Amino acid sequence: MNTKHKDAIERAKEYGLDLTLLYENLKRTPTERIENFVRWLELVDELKRAKQRKEKNNVRYQKDT
Amino acid sequence: MLDIKKILESLNKHNVRYIVVGGTAAIAQGSARLTFDFDICYARDKENLKNIVMAIAPFHPYLRGAPKNLPFIFDAKTLQMGLNFTFSTDVGDIDLIGELSGLGDYNEVLKYAGKSQIYNIDCHILLLEGLIKNKKTVAREKDKEALIELEALLEIQKQQK
């Protein structure tokens, strides 16, 4: 194995990257990887909406009290 | 939210010459990082600029972060006058890149690209070596982790071949 290449993996481990995510992703097709990514985006989007709803409800609560 | 399928379908429908670069290209090759925009490097000949306009205009592009009352016309002339653009659209944020740091224009980036299929749509994507070269040239502190990941990914890919 090329030492330089070995260093790239070691460096990632030392940095704290979870390499199991990469190994899992590489088992997937490009489309599956993109679909997986889109699901994450949907989750982020939902969390943003939940935050907005919470903030809106807090304003209502403050007005009522 | 980003709708990659719709963007790719429209680009191909209008015969746009483009290469998927940036975070989406990295994800398509196994990166576990998130991105919130879709970056393409595009050819800047007149015909391609017209095709880009036809492909992107239905998504109502607007200069990202610009005031809403700014007069802006998304046409080939506007694209001709600029180089790299960041747009907000109905299908998410799209960045049009005329020249990619460390690599160059469309023809240069193409040398570092490979053919791929996403959602059964044929497209060129910038391969890991090109993504790494770009990140090394830009050398932004925020890209440090991405660069480490890309280099590890490249090595894992090589080991698996």
Image (tube, coloured by chain):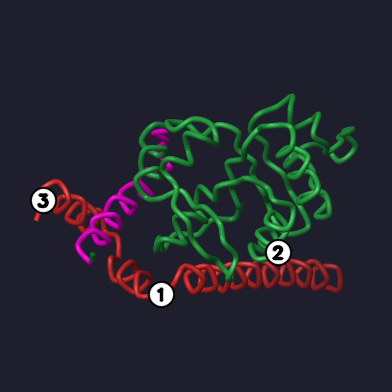
Chain colours: A red, B green
**Residue A28 numbered mark, or none:** 1
- B147 w.r.t. B84: above or below: below
Hey, what amino acid is under mark 2? Lys
Q: Which segment is the magenta one?
A: B138-160
Reading the image, the residue beneath label 2 is B6
Residue at 78 percent across and 68 percent down: it is: A56
Residue at 47 percent across and 67 percent down: it is: A30
| Residue B40 locus on image (x, y percent) | 59, 46
Reading the image, the residue beneath label 3 is A2
Marks 1 and 3 sit apart, C-alpha to C-alpha, by: 26 Å
Q: Quadrant of the C terminus of chain B?
A: bottom left
Q: Foreground residue, B42 or B91?
A: B42
Tag 2, which chain?
B
Residues flagged by tags 1 and 3 on a common chain? yes
Q: Quadrant of the N terminus of chain B?
A: bottom right
Marks 3 and 2 sit apart, C-alpha to C-alpha, by: 41 Å
Tag 1, which chain?
A
